[in-house]
Amino acid sequence: MPSLTVFICSFMVAAPIFGYLGDRFNRKVILSCGIFFWSIVTLSSSFISKEYYWLFVLSRGLVGIGESSYSSISPTIIGDLFTSNSRTMMLSVFYLAIPLGSGLGYILGSSAKVAAGDWHWALRVSPALGITAGTLILVFVPEPKRGSADQMGRVRNRTSWLCDMKALAKNRSYVFSSLASSAVSFATGAFGMWIPLYLARAQVVQKTGEACTKDVCSSTDSLIFGAITCVTGLLGVVIGAATTRLCRQKTERADPLVCAVSMLGSAIFICLIFVVAKKSIVGAYVCIFIGETLLFLNWAITADILMFVVIPTRRATAVAFQSFTSHLLGDAGSPYLIGLISDALQQSYTTSALWRFLSLGYALMLCPFIIVLGGMFFLATALFFLDDREKAEKQLSQMTRPPSSVKV
């Protein structure tokens, strides 16, 4: 956990900086440099021996700096290249990388770890892909003018960073959708860490598997969970984009409402995981599949909500703080909290395989409650969405000159 704490601290310090830079300087250069930096640090950390654990912890902090750069800036470039339904679709393609990358990480990382018999090799797979992606971005991705997709003219007066932060804090749709995004991150972070172990313990209880006592255990459950995450990520973002486009024909509040309904539905199936896992592993995987699909519906839609209610010149700052909030309140602490609760529950019955399984399941039951809370936050977003969108449009028109009045 020290490495995770350092990661969050570095992300916390770096995110506002990159949000500020992303609203004022060349974004694709910052984006590419962040990816290069992250890739090099990740590769270098795989060669650190256990005698220099402090150096490995430091490298996790540097990875946090690299991640904060591209996670803060990438959506704003897409927001300036597309608009309306096209933007929703393109953001869906972009946010597909979150569950898809997570799933591939499980598959590639677990395979490399088992094949080499050394977990360090799990850190040597992704850097090559990162360097390739950074190069392609630097060479082929255009640097659009901020607000170009919104037909934004020349900015008369750019607001200060402090003014941007005050405006975001008063933006109710932004605040509530950020809290809802944190709920999603809380669940996905906890699931990624504990669901494979939970299912392995379920097999021990069913007497279809044996408890692992080795340093490097079989990765079957991680591989299956990773594959499910890949598929559900793909289905989730595609279904989310299509559903939102259809619902926009019925109501202008479609974006937050689709997110709210999908999260509340996801909570039901995630609860069922812990009901059926004791008897059927297949049944648990089915519930995971449906629950994750519904959970991943809102990844791109949440970013699209931000694009509607935040003006282009402060979107990088908004994305940076939303991402930071999601990490801080979500996946940074959820794995630790679930583990802490599970350990506390099984403390008196540490030798019981059944109780080790049940205690982890009881701890993971916190996730559907957090997801329901996230659904409530999206419903709150729906209440203020139209007002905040209208305010953003008015402020945008006040900050710019009509294109026809700008002298060439």
Image: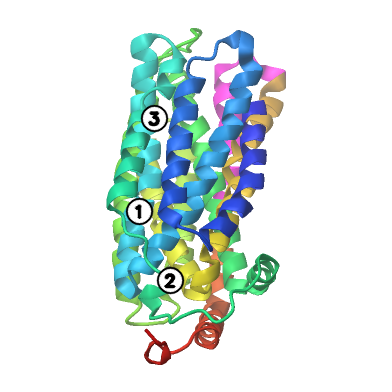
Q: Amino acid at mark 3?
A: Pro
Mark 2, secondary structure of its residue: helix
Q: Residue at x 62, y 13 (%)?
A: 52
Reply above or below: 318 against 44: below
Magenta region, residue range: 348-369
Q: Which residue is mark 2?
A: 255
Label 2 and label 3: CA atoms lie apart by: 35 Å
Q: Amino acid at mark 2?
A: Asp
Q: Residue at x 33, y 34 (%)?
A: 129
**Would you call the spot at circle 2 few (<14 residues within 10 Å), some (14-19), or many (20 or more)?**
many
Q: Position of residue 12 (x, y in %)?
A: 65, 46
Residue 127 marker: 3
- 341 left or right, relative to 223: right
Marks 3, 1: nearer the viewer: 3
Marks 1, 2: nearer the viewer: 1
Q: Which residue is mark 1?
A: 94
The answer to which of marks 3 and 1 sits earlier in the sequence is 1
Label 3 and label 1: CA atoms lie apart by: 19 Å
Q: Position of residue 294 (x, y in %)?
A: 40, 54
Which one is in front, 111 or 225? 111
Mark 1, secondary structure of its residue: helix
Q: Residue at x 55, y 17 (%)?
A: 353
Q: Amino acid at mark 1?
A: Phe
Q: Residue at x 59, y 10 (%)?
A: 50
